[in-house]
Amino acid sequence: MSTRPWLEHEILVTVGTGGVGKTTVAAAIGLEAARRGKRVLVLTIDPARRLADALGVGELGHEPRTVPRKVLRAAGIKGDGELVAMMLDTKRTFDELVSRYSPDQESLERILANPIYQNLTDALAGSREYSAMEKLHQLHSTGEYDLIVLDTPPSTHALDFLDAPRRLTGFLESDFLKLMFAPAIAMGRTGFRIFRFGSATVLRVMETLTGLGFLRAISDFLLAFESMLEGFTTRAREVEALLRDPICGFVLVVGPDPGQARRAEDFWARLQQERTHLLGLVVNRVRSWPGDEDAPELGEADAEHVTRWLAKGLAEQGSVFDPERAAREVVETLVRQASLARRDAEVCARLIKALGVPPETLHQIPLFSEDVHALDGLRCMGAYLFEDGGHA
Amino acid sequence: MRKGLEALTQQRLLIVTGKGGTGKTTVAAALGMLAARQGLDTVVIEVGDTSLLPRLLCKDHESLEEDGGRSPVQVAPHLFTLRIVPEVALTEYLELQLKVRRIVRLVIRNQGFRRLLDAAPGWRALITLGKLWYLQSQMDSGRPRWPLLIVDGPATGHGLSFLSVPNVVLDTVRIGPLRRQTNRVQELLNDASRTLVLPVTLPEELPVSETLELCERVRELGMTLGPVIANAVEPAPDLANLEPILAHIARLSAPPADSALLTPEVLRKCLDYQRRRSELQRGFLETLEQEAGPAILPLPYLARAIDSPETLSPLADALATALADWGESS
């Protein structure tokens, strides 16, 4: 656990499973930093069209877009802070990488024209995560921003993106690619040398099954990557170091669903193992009970009792509607909300216990009943994170 | 176009997909439960590296015997589950193709081949789709052995590259058995009378915008969309006269002593909150209805964690209701 205030980092990474509102939390953090006069970039992965609308930046794309000053002013944000948003495009990031690391024009053209590269960059092990990390590194080294908030791709499994540099370079590093394919191509032959597989039968079998075109496309693809290996590996090491630097903090975002909370425990443990700087846990969309007390436990008998009380009261008022039915509807809503509020409170309490963290590490954001993607909503969300003077 | 449950059960392959966290797995399982209730032999299939379905669909899932992911395992009457493991499917495929186990072992154990597999993108998706094709082609006494396959597909980002792999292969490979077999997979995927893609979403901003993109991509790939399942829709308090009721509640005398927490103020806040939540969701549902194309099937938000057939059953019932409503819609 790191105690450095959130906004005193150069990089904040929001992590978590899908569908928990990571993007919105990342935007709320960014907005708060801008409010405090920082120049902030929010780098998001999700195609957050309406988020872009709310920020007044039109369509979000691969180029950074600055939120217009008048939009910030309208949301009550004064000062010189700047908020920039950008959406990651895996394919474009890879194209940039390939252009940078290709040893020569011929290799570059070969990979860009490869059908497997064109269509399957997304399917390449860890490519989405790798490109997010790559972009982060690139933007951080420009020194243009005081803070970069990275909204990572959702992952079901502990932190795919921490492994991404290793996974990608892992397969590129094995020199089997060179051994297997290079000589054949150097000799200007189509196909590969049989003996490279160590078994004539194996190659013959593969040829029979797939046809040479496919193997050739795959070998070209792998070979082209092989030529860029050095660039990729160096960069991967830099990214790994950056992610473990104290200037880079991690915030785990979870939903109050019991299943998600269990996965959050795994995430947390993995982040600790990886020696990252953990700043806290955001439980998003928590349902609360209106009023000062905890949500009551309402059993069937209680519900029945309250229904009768309410029906009687409504009947006495001489209503134009059916008091019985109205009372039932009202109490159903009430019971439902109480039980959800109790469930969410239990999940939060369990998380604090399971992770062994001080309660103030866990920040609850309520499930808003208004659209949170207007700037006002983001401000409101930020208030839940930073209400104690920025020590979120 | 047919509507209702029948529109789904007369298909051969239903691919359930959507953004992470929308409840794809439980929806796929609930759909399987529903189809099996009709007496149709249904296989619910998962393709990731977690195995969640047996717990959801089998009362006694710990005593299930698997055969390493080769064939569907029965978990309830007419209901089967299967987790497709690409490595296992590949071995099986090679055995079918090569017929000599010794040669298959030779290939599978070859270092060069193994490393190629580690590095090559896309083959896992291809072999998984191939396995689906194989399952739907299996016959038993002149009838399909597996009349209905329901796939709990990967989350959207991966889901789309998953479904586009056959196109890539067909673009790359001009001749040979791989092309022939991929062609058959592609035909299955693009056949509106056999395969439907069912997006699962939530009535919230990002899931809705991602679903709209998904629908567009599915059409571009030449596949057919089934209804979009909107999960976790919150109840709209069905109060025709909500405002006067709230006004009455505000004027009520103090609640009974044992319900001291239930002040008129609390009641008012609860109702008001729920009403606004449901209005907010309705807005996203309307966007979905106007822009997605296919019908929208709403499923209610269920507070209880779903982790067994017993807890899944209410979702299956809700799905049945939504399908029936769709069937009766004009």
Image: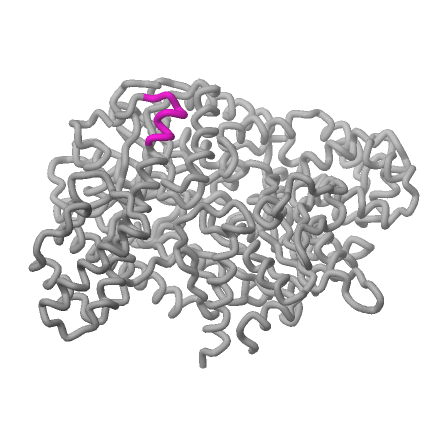
Give the left or right position of residue B135, taking residue A79 as reference: right
Q: Inspect the magenta stretch and tell me whether residue B15 lies in it.
A: no
Seen at 45% across and 58% down, the residue is B211
Q: Position of residue B224 (x, y in %)?
A: 57, 67
Residues in magenta, as a range: A349-357
Give the left or right position of residue B270, taking residue A173 as reference: left
| Rendered image coloring scheme | one colour
Image quarter hosting the N terminus of chain B: bottom right
Q: Position of residue B42 (x, y in %)?
A: 67, 59
Seen at 37% across and 21% down, the residue is A356
Q: Is residue A195 visible?
A: yes
Image quarter hosting the C terminus of chain B: bottom left
Task: Name the main secondary structure of what is drawn in magenta.
Answer: helix
Seen at 50% across and 76% down, the residue is B327
Q: Position of residue A302 (x, y in %)?
A: 27, 50
| Position of A62 relative to B299 (above/below) | above
Rendering quarter of residue A85: top left
Q: Position of residue B99 (x, y in %)?
A: 91, 47
Report the label total.
0
| Position of A362 relative to B87 (above/below) | above
Q: Inspect the magenta stretch and tell me whether residue A356 lies in it.
A: yes
Using the image as rendered, state which of residue B205 and residue B248 is in the foreground. B248
Seen at 18% across and 39% down, the residue is A293
